[in-house]
Structures are given as structure tokens and as C-alpha cells.
Amino acid sequence: MSTIYGIQYLRAVAALGVVVFHAAERTGHHFAIGAAGVDIFFVISGFIMWVISERRPMSPFSFLRDRVQRIAPVYWLATAVMVVGGLAGLFPNLVLSPTHVVASLLFVPIASPSTGEVWPVLVQGWTLNYEMFFYAVFALTLLLPRSRRLLAISTCFVLLVGLGFAIDTDNALFSTYTRPIILEFVAGMIIAELWLRDRVQGGNAGLALVAIGVSGFAALAVFRLPFDEFVLGPLAVLLVVGTLALESRGWFRPRRLPTLLGDASYSIYLWHTFAISVVVKVCARAGLDLALSAFLAVLSGTALGVAAYVLLEKPLTRRLRPRMTPKPLQQAA
């Protein structure tokens, strides 16, 4: 399976956006738009899963096993670090409970005893609850003929979102899996189907779409406008479609650093907050300027994620999937 370098580089951008968002948040700066990296990840995830299912047919069980092996081990390790750190008193604001820890490890949305928010022990793992739900539904659709899969999962997710608008409840499971953000996976699959049919092409059109997407994100950041998935989702779609259109024209070439950051985007996403927390505290004690602290936090968070990819994620993936050659396209957000 050939690497789609535009998507690979976009994954790197999305991960770095989240890193900058958290570093800015911890140092008193404003970069809320960095959280939009999650929306880009979700669109890309839908795209990748649809392309993989087309190029490498598999049973529902094999698909889920592959996804769990890819996602869970590194996440469990990061969660374990949080739990151990919490028990050791390193995270004074973290309140642990056996129910919350188990639910976090099993990707079950549940209110955190620390904040009351529907977050797992490792807060950024909230996106993985959505990813695993998407994988479970996607796996079920593999039982259907290919021609019916996209319609089936699209209908399912649209109905769930409709129920979310119709029913007002505080139930964590219901409120999580009826959020409109799940439609970003559907958008990614539709883009993938168009891509497989060679319907996503055009250098000028690609540039225009990327420019509109970037301009939209920039406007939200500069003017500090409110946003949600109804705003970020379409912008993420424009960015992904535009990137693929440029990909079809050969705009992207293999480059070592962005390829590495794309490969490591999952580990960067999981581990960066650990480094940011340490660096921000050290910089505060040293009396360093907040801008410098933010820069060092971004640098250290990214570096820790890359190190975790090289030392943990990559070896684990190879060990668990010995018969498969890892390809960047096969990696989920």
C-alpha cells in the first residue's frame, strides 16, 4: 500500500496543532484553534479506514483486532503512567477511582471524578473513545456487501446525531456517541470513496480548498471566534480534500522530518502533555519568559512523542503484527 504523503504530513500538522494548543493553555497564551487537530484526525481516520478496507479486505474480527493492537497498548501504557503518577502524588488534581480507571482502559465514556467532565484518566484519550466506537460500527458494516457499507454507517451516524438533538440527557454514553463530531468520520469515508474513484484531482482546485481551509482556521484564531464541530468539521474536510487534490498532482515528496512526525503523530498526541507539564513547571521556577516557556514546551512535547514512537509504539506494533509491514497510511489518528 503506497504512502499518501499529503495525508501523512497533514497528520503531523494536526498533532502539532494539539501540542501548541496545550502548551499555550499552560503558559497563558491563546491558541484554542489548535484543538481543531482532533477534527482533522477524525476526517483522516474515516478516510484511512475506508481505503484500508478497500485495499486489504478483512473480516470484522480481524479488523477490530488490528485496530485494538494498533491503538490500545500504547494508550494503556500512557494511562498507566498517569495512574502511577497519581498514586505517587505527582498529579495533585487527579482523583482516581477503580471504576474510572477501568472504564478509561476499555474506552468507555464516563465522568471523571477529578472534574466531572466525560474524560478518561489520560484526558486526551477522549478522542479514542470516539475512534473505538467508529471502529466497532465500521467492523459491523464489513458484514454487508461493499456497495451498502457507506450508506449503512452514514445512516447510523446521522440517526445517532438526530437522537442527540431530540433527547436531552446527562448519560455519558448517549451524550458522547450522539455528538455531531462523529459525522467527521463519515465525511472522511466519503472523501476516500471519491479518492478511490479518482474524483479528487486538480492542482488549482486543491490550492483553493487548502487556502480556504487554512484561512478559516486562521480567522477563528486571530479573531478568537467561537467554534464547534459544525465549523471545524467543514474546514477540516476542505483541508483534507485540498491536500488530496494536490497529492494527485504530485505536490508532495518524501521528506524525512515531516514523514517522521506523521508516523509519530499518535504517540505525540498521547504523550506530549507529560513533557509540557514538566517543562512549564521548570520554566516557571527558573523565571523564564512565558513565550520561551511555551516554545520549549512545544519542543519537548513533540520530542517526547517522537521518542515514544521510536522506543515504544514502533516496536510494539512490529511485535504484535509480525506478518504485516507497517505503512504510514495504515496508522490511525
Image (cartoon, grey):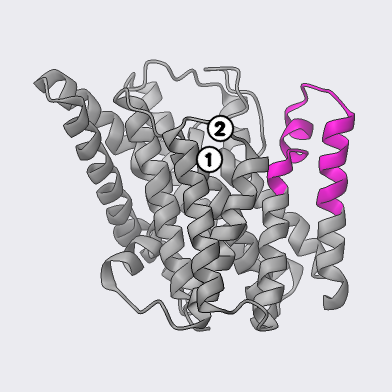
- Rendered location of residue 67, percent (x, y): 60, 61
Mark carried by residue 271 = none
Q: Looking at the picture, how far across and down is residue 253, in whole percent?
A: 36, 79
The spot of residue 173 in percent (x, y) is 75, 33
- Residue beneath the point at 59% across and 59% down: 238
The residue closer to the viewer here, 127 or 24, is: 24
Residue 315 in which image quadrant: bottom left
* Residue matched to label 2: 120
Task: Residue 260: name its quadrant.
Answer: bottom left
Label 1, on which residue?
Answer: 125
1 and 2 marks in contact (CB < 8 Å): yes
Q: Secondary structure at mark 2?
A: loop
Q: Is residue 183 left or right of residue 77?
A: right
Q: Residue at x 40, y 46 (%)?
A: 17
Residue 179 sits inside the magenta stretch: yes
User: Residue 279, relative to residue 316: is it above or below?
Assistant: above
Q: Secondary structure at mark 1?
A: helix
Identify the magenta region. 156-182
* Pointer 2 local density, CA inside 10 Å: few below 14, some 14–19, many at least 20: many
Q: Is residue 208 magenta?
A: no
Magenta stretch, overall SS = helix
